[in-house]
Image (tube, rainbow, N blue to C red):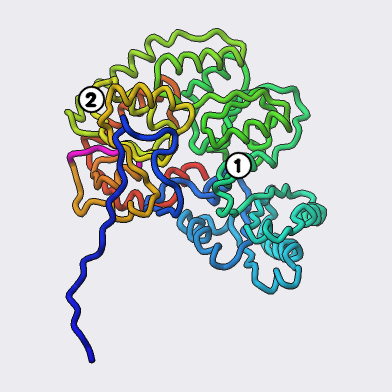
């Protein structure tokens, strides 16, 4: 017998939230099963690898794993620089994992209209769990194609929580293709960042004052440019995920590595600039005017916001707490932080901010309950910094940036403040923007 049941509304789980004054350090929420919100701006390993100019990427994975990376390449319109090799159950059962790589890569390269100078071969979890001899496979490929530089890359999302996550490893492998320089060392390299800081940055300024070239991978268009990075004497890393890249360049190429994390605090920025000047052997320039310009821009942002709340997420910047503190101290009303964890470098700012603005709400982004945390209607009374902050608040005003953008130092604070003021004045189509993978990648790849 058929029975009619009353409609049961979808169950909505309460989203976990904590006031900053009560939030645990450094992981405020439990970790386990994770939800991935549909904010697609952060780069994938496909996007990162494409920074190597003229390279060809080859993913060797099971068919289900290939779907996402194929779509990433297609969305960028870079199918001509991208190929796949499907790994099957038979390859594993018959012990053919290594032969599949050799034969598949050979087949692909022989059919390309032109042999690329560099090939990035992405192995998968299956190869590592089964103990495949990847080193032997890559040696055989190098013997068959002596004019091609093969780089081992990794499609291993199951190791995301390991000591060296795939993102960190990918940034390191970007520089695997460099060969020892046969010319005297000289130059400053910023490694592991996704967007170019540019010729007006403090890094370029320091290099110019020292009379040496300035190198950064984003924006390079030829493999010859890429090879010149091996001539650098100093390497600077700004993103914590680039630390292993800096160490790799120091160990393999003898570069002196300096980690200068992104920051928003005036005194710490001055300290970093002083360290940069000492590294390159130049006197530190007067930063008075730069600091004044940054303060003026922050005041303009506060005026444009006119008391409206601001939400910040961890995808927008590697230092969300430091940014929140600088904004609060500039008279800007920060109300929400979307962070699953905090960096050790943010500890001081965390303790100060929880006293200055204890009511700031801290939200996770990946716990399953956040599946139900999106508001039903859009809001124009809040400004979001970062895609996840915009998604979870429903904001129509968003400053769209990833990992701090191309902004570092006092000039970077000024640029960010001006962009925040512009975001406060003009709404954007957030749904359209966050649906695009790899924010800014088309300008670099």
Which residue in the protein does label 1 denote?
163
Q: Height in image: 235 above or below 69?
A: above
Main secondary structure of the magenta stretch: strand
Q: Which mark is residue 302?
A: 2
Q: Which stretch is magenta?
A: 381-387
Q: Position of residue 144 (x, y in %)?
A: 80, 56
Residue positioned 62% across, 11% down in the render: 281
Q: Position of residue 155 (x, y in %)?
A: 59, 54
Tell whether 13 sits left or right of 402.
left
> Is 70 on the left or on the right of 37, as rendered?
right
Q: Residues within 10 Å of mark 2 (few under 14, many from 20)?
A: many
Give 290 or 8, whichever is nearer the viewer: 8
Residue nearest the observer in this picture, 340 or 437: 340
Residue placed furthest toward the bottom: 1
Residue at 59% in and 12% down:
278
* Disc marking residue 395: none
Q: Kindly state the secondary structure of the residue where label 2 is placed.
A: helix
Going from the N terminus, do you reach mark 1 or mark 2 first? 1
Question: Dot 1 lies on which element?
Answer: loop
Q: Residues within 10 Å of mark 1 (few under 14, many from 20)?
A: few
Q: Residue 358: x and y, percent? A: 28, 28
């Amino acid at each position: 017998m058929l029975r009619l049941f009353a409609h049961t509304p979808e169950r909505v789980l309460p989203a976990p939230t904590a006031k900053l004054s009560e939030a645990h350090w450094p992981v405020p929420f439990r970790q386990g099963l994770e939800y991935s919100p549909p904010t697609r701006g952060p780069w994938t390993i496909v996007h990162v690898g494409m920074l190597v100019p003229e390279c060809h990427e080859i993913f060797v994975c099971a068919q289900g794993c290939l779907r996402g990376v194929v779509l990433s390449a297609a969305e960028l319109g870079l199918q001509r620089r991208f190929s796949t090799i499907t790994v099957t159950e038979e390859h594993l059962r018959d012990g053919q994992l290594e032969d599949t790589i050799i034969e598949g890569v050979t087949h692909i390269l022989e059919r390309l209209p032109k042999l690329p100078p560099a090939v990035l071969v992405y192995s998968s979890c299956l190869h590592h769990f089964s103990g495949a001899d990847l080193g032997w496979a890559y040696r055989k490929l190098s013997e068959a194609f002596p004019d091609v530089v093969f780089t081992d890359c990794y499609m291993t999302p199951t190791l995301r929580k390991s000591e060296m996550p795939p993102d960190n490893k990918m940034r390191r492998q970007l520089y695997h293709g460099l060969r020892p320089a046969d010319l005297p060392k000289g130059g400053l390299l910023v490694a592991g960042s996704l967007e170019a800081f540019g010729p007006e940055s403090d890094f370029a300024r320091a290099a110019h004052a020292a009379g040496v070239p300035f190198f950064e991978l984003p924006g390079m268009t030829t493999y010859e440019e890429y090879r010149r990075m091996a001539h650098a004497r100093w390497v600077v890393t700004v993103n914590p995920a680039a630390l292993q890249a800096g160490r790799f360049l120091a160990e393999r190429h003898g570069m002196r590595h300096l980690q200068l994390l992104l920051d928003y605090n005036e005194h710490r920025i001055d300290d970093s600039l002083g360290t940069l000047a000492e590294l390159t052997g130049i006197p530190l320039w007067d930063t008075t005017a730069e600091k004044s310009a940054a303060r003026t821009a922050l005041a303009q942002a506060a005026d444009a916001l006119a008391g409206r709340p601001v939400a910040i997420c961890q995808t927008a910047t590697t230092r969300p707490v430091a940014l929140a503190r600088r904004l609060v101290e500039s008279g800007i009303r920060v109300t929400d932080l979307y962070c699953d964890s905090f960096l050790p470098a943010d500890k001081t700012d965390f303790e100060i901010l929880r006293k200055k603005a204890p009511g700031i709400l801290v939200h996770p982004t990946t716990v399953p309950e956040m599946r139900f945390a999106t508001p039903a209607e859009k809001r124009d009374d809040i400004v979001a910094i970062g895609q996840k902050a915009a998604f979870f608040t429903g904001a129509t005003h968003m400053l769209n940036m990833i990992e701090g953008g191309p902004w570092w130092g006092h000039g970077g604070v000024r640029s960010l403040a001006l962009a925040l003021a512009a975001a406060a004045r003009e709404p954007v189509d957030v749904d359209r923007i966050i649906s695009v993978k790899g924010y800014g990648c088309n300008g670099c790849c």
